[in-house]
Image: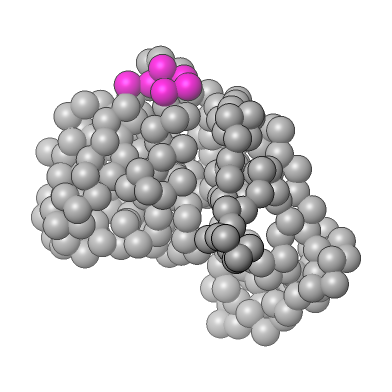
Amino acid sequence: MVLTHANILANARGASEVCGFNERDVSLSWMPLTHDMGLIGFHLVMFFNRVRAHLMPTELFIRRPLLWLEFASGVRATILSSPNFGYKHYLKVLGERPVDGLDLSSVRLIFNGAEPISVELCNRFLERMGAARLSRTAMYPVYGLAEASLAVSFPPPGEALRTLVADRHHLAVGEPIRLLPAGSQAGIELVSEGKAIPYCSVRIVDDMDRALAQGQCRSRADQRVECHAGLLRGPGGERR
């Protein structure tokens, strides 16, 4: 994927306007710089906003995940991030260890993206880390993809998770979504990832490139968001 200077700056500005990043923020990321969320989201965007940014080696997080939030507590981090599996990995290694020695009260946003988001895992993580004074409004579910430079949709910061329960038997592309009561056996709980950030527009279509109405289901691949200069191709024209 080829991204221009203008692509990245527009995306950084849109994300920054929603999140209110500023020079008083302190970020900590273990995401690799070979991944767009690590490179653009937690390196370039932080640089763009003069955020004091800390990088933790990805291999260190995998081997010793508890160091992540110990370090966050120590540097009074305000911005954190992890895909869904990172929260699961952290909780698995944490086990029954106490966390009241940590102070995560400074954390205002803890991004959750790059993978499907489990509402159950989000709530379990927030409940477990409540003893470390992590706010329940800090969990920040977002959506993005490389074709948009990175960020596509963000919710308003400082709000609790917004979820809905959809009938898992009616999720075909173009089919109207059926909402069910919380706890329904046929339901799947989904988390809202907000709305399109500034300078980014989203068109949701079916397999025939026809726009879908509000409340109709789509597959992830049917979302059309592009803000890039093209694809790298080999000598024979193949995609790289």
Q: Tell me: 234 left or right of 68.
A: right
Write the residue at 71% across / 33% down.
199
Q: Picture coordinates of residue 60 (x, y %)?
A: 16, 50
Query: Residue 25's quadrant in the figure?
Result: top left
Q: Tally the marks.
A: 0
Q: What segment is highlighted magenta in the picture? A: 47-52
Query: Residue at 39% across / 43% down in the picture?
Result: 38
**Residue 102 part of the magenta segment:** no
Q: On the image, which quarter does residue 150 sit in?
A: top right
Q: Quadrant of residue 156?
A: top right
Q: Using the rendered image of the protein, determine whether residue 159 is visible from the camera's viewpoint.
A: yes
Q: Position of residue 44 (x, y in %)?
A: 44, 30
The residue sitting at 54% across, 39% down in the picture is: 159
The answer to whether one can see residue 151 in this image is no
Which residue is farthest front? 235
> Residue 74 location in percent, x, y?
17, 29
Q: Residue at (18%, 36%) from the top-left corner?
A: 71
From what the image shows, is residue 158 above or below residue 225?
Answer: above
The residue closer to the viewer here, 161 or 4, is 4
Query: Position of 203 compared to 1: left or right?
Result: right
Q: Residue 108 in the image: x percent, y percent? A: 41, 32
